[in-house]
Image (spheres, helix red, strand yellow):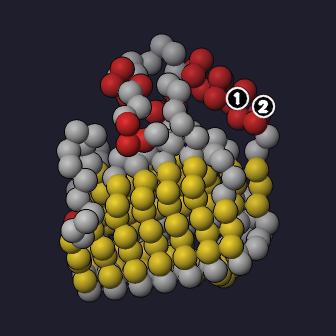
Amino acid sequence: MEVQQVVNQRYTCGEGTHILSPGLKQCALDFYRSPESRVTPCLYRNCHFDGSKTFWAVKFSFEYQQFFERCSFIGGSSGLIDVCRGGDLSFKDCTFVGNSRKAQLFIRGGAKNIVFENCKFISERSFVFSSWFVFGSWSLFDFFYRPYLRNIEIKNCTFTKGCIMKGISMYSEKVKRDNSYFPWLTMPCWMIRVYWKIKRRVLKNKNIPLFMSKVYPQEL
């Protein structure tokens, strides 16, 4: 497998993607791939992703085989990382600095095969009623059936400040934690089913595109 390499690059909100507000960017770098396009594996080494003046440091949508080594991520007003669908993402020896009192890393939409290894999570603020990770939270893709979030690993990671509860699991299989022992909340399955049912009922009259219902082979 040929892997492209990006070394010593800095990404700020100037390279991010536009949202509705004129001149405002959504994140420092947006990893978006169309389901029909070819996967391009890429290794980012010693890169800096600064989302401090926008919402996120990075966002992933249906992206696969992206690898990060010794990179730093500065969060924005919504958090650090948002992953929706996709997978095969690896973060090794990276530093994550959160600037928000909200949860910092959202991984959802049936994403899979994501590893955080030897990473440092540092919060500039204390956030009592939130967590660092939220696994399997709601997305519009969950209006239709999707696979569980799965094969998530957190290895030898450290946390500074933030809240006591480091992670929340919702529509997700069990998250593997190696030498990263910290308080974790797993929501009961019945509660998730009820919550999903309510969300789908509320949105049933919305114009949800049918293409969002498709589960592609690489997602299974």
Residue 170 is situated, as x and y percent measured from the top left of the image, at 67, 45
| Relative depth, front residue between 74 and 212 | 212
- Real-space Cα distance between discs 1 and 2? 5 Å
Query: Residue at position x 52%, y 46% from top?
Result: 108
Discs 1, 2 touching: Cβ within 8 Å: yes
What's the residue type where badge 2 is placed? Answer: Trp
Question: Which residue has dot 2 on it?
Answer: 190
| Relative depth, front residue between 56 and 35 | 35
Query: Residue at position x 56%, y 82% from top?
Result: 118
Question: Which residue has dot 1 on it?
Answer: 193
Query: Residue at position x 34%, y 85% from top?
Result: 46
Residue 178 is situated, as x and y percent measured from the top left of the image, at 68, 73
Residue 204 is situated, as x and y percent measured from the top left of the image, at 51, 15
For label 1, the crowd category at 10 Å Cα-Cα, with few meaning under 14, some 14 to 19 and many 20 or more, is: few
SS for dot 2 = helix
Question: Does 167 sit above or below residue 123?
Answer: above
Query: Does the image show residue 93?
Result: yes
For label 2, the crowd category at 10 Å Cα-Cα, with few meaning under 14, some 14 to 19 and many 20 or more, is: few
What's the residue type where badge 1 is placed? Answer: Arg
Location of residue 153 (image quadrant): bottom right
Question: Does 26 sit above or below residue 125?
Answer: above
Question: Does 90 sit above or below residue 26?
Answer: below
